[in-house]
Amino acid sequence: MKENNNLLDRRSAPKIHLPGLSSIPMPIELHPGLLYFEKKGCPVFKLDIVFPHAGLGNSSLKKENMMVADLLLSGTSKYNAQELNESLDSLGSYYNIYTDYYKSTLSIYGKNDKYSEILALWNHILNDIYFDPKEIEIYINQKVNNLNIQKSKTSYQAKKCINKAWFGSKNVLGYMLQEKDFKGLNINTLSTFYAKNFLKYYFILSGEIESKKAIEWATKFKITGSYSFCVDKINFEKRKTDKNSYTIEKSNQSSVIARVEIPNRLHKDYAALSMLNLILGGYFGARIMKNIREEKGWTYGMYSVIRNFDTIAYLEISGDVLADKVGSVISEIEREVRILCEEEVSKEEWNMAKNYYLGSLQRSFDSFFSHSDKFLSLQETTLNLDWYYFFVEEIKKLEAADVKKAANTYLNKETLFYTWSGPKQ
């Protein structure tokens, strides 16, 4: 049989290629409060309406800003919630609403030829909002029912334990909502919070919309030119107590969470910490996945992630495990951490992880609409998208020894902070 030279030779690993980032578009300011990512030939648009005073950091422990964001389409003086959603459907438009510590973001998608009609409807919604008592009642019932379901989940309780210990119960990120918080909602409280926190916003427009039309509608919305977030800086309490666990006797699983404080993306060690996170638990081929899932079968999945705030960050390891394996899982996490502190990553594993990470970064920019998401994700540290050019070059310069050094500096048995939930051990 004639050999086909075009077939992939699976007897040897492919050559490692470390990609860089192709040109990343930068937003231009068409008008005060209107940032524009232009994409020629794009038939659809994405409009992010960003409320910089409507993050969780601007609300009380009851997180009213998040609730107001959820109820933006509860009605107006002319239309009820059903009519508003049907109108958007008829225009071929959809939306997402997301609230984090720094802001709330309303992302609107639609076809270019419907831009004016879609924005006219949203202009009406935001300037003539009416919190319908019927919609409030439906929302409360949904949230209370969901809360009661979550209470029976070990993952929810473990997260509740660690957030309370990590941020403190007097911080909005450390407080988990209760039934009474939802049941206290009414038209007056929602309207007050809306008027205080949602009437200042700016636009991030992505696609190909005529500049004149984009500016015209931005003016109609009366957008603000301020892009800054007005929230208190986050401080980690990390208060270890004997209450860092929650018992759910009837559960057939446990949930484990471990956190460690690290510098955020502004720090010189952030690239090394990012690679450390990846190798430890940042993708399916990571060490804790291979160990705890593939080899021992104690979990469906255990991962690690990095969460950034304006001045600090943390690395978190979490997963649902067999009910009687909490102690064993913690021991294996600490074992993997100890190995990273004592031994350099092998050349084979290092090349695979590094190439995977750079390839993932490259792919994350494939979707044009992701650019505004990435832009917003950097705003709490006042960075622009060109930070990614710097970050990729830092990753490419790293050696395995840099990861070992980062592990010894930031990640060890003494610095790991655990909570867990499940049956008594």
Image (tube, rainbow, N blue to C red):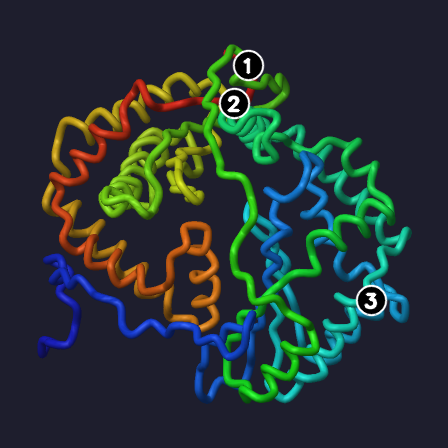
Q: Quadrant of residue 231?
A: top right
Does label 3 or label 2 sit earlier along the sequence? 3
Q: Do residues under tags 1 and 2 come within 8 Å of each other at their CB atoms? A: yes
Identify the residue at image location x=28%, y=29%.
411
Q: Do residues under tags 3 and 2 come within 8 Å of each other at their CB atoms? A: no
Structural distance between the alpha carbons of marks 1 and 2:
9 Å
Q: Is residue 97 left or right of residue 163?
A: right
- Mark nearest the camera among 3 and 2 is 3
Label 2 amino acid? Answer: Ala
Q: Is residue 402 left or right of residue 97?
A: left
Provide the secondary structure element on which disc 3 rests.
Answer: loop
Percent position of residue 234, x then y: 49, 36
Q: Which mark is residue 243?
A: 1
Residue matched to label 3: 128
Instruction: Report if residue 383 is visible in the image.
Output: yes
Q: Is residue 254 left or right of residue 129?
A: left
Tally of marks: 3
Label 1 amino acid? Answer: Lys
Identify the residue at image location x=62%, y=30%.
175
Structural distance between the alpha carbons of marks 3 and 2:
41 Å
- In the rendered image of this protein, does residue 95 appear above or below residue 206? above
Identify the residue at image location x=13%, y=65%.
9
Residue matched to label 2: 165
Q: Nearer the viewer, residue 128 or 281?
A: 128
Percent position of residue 255, x then y: 50, 27
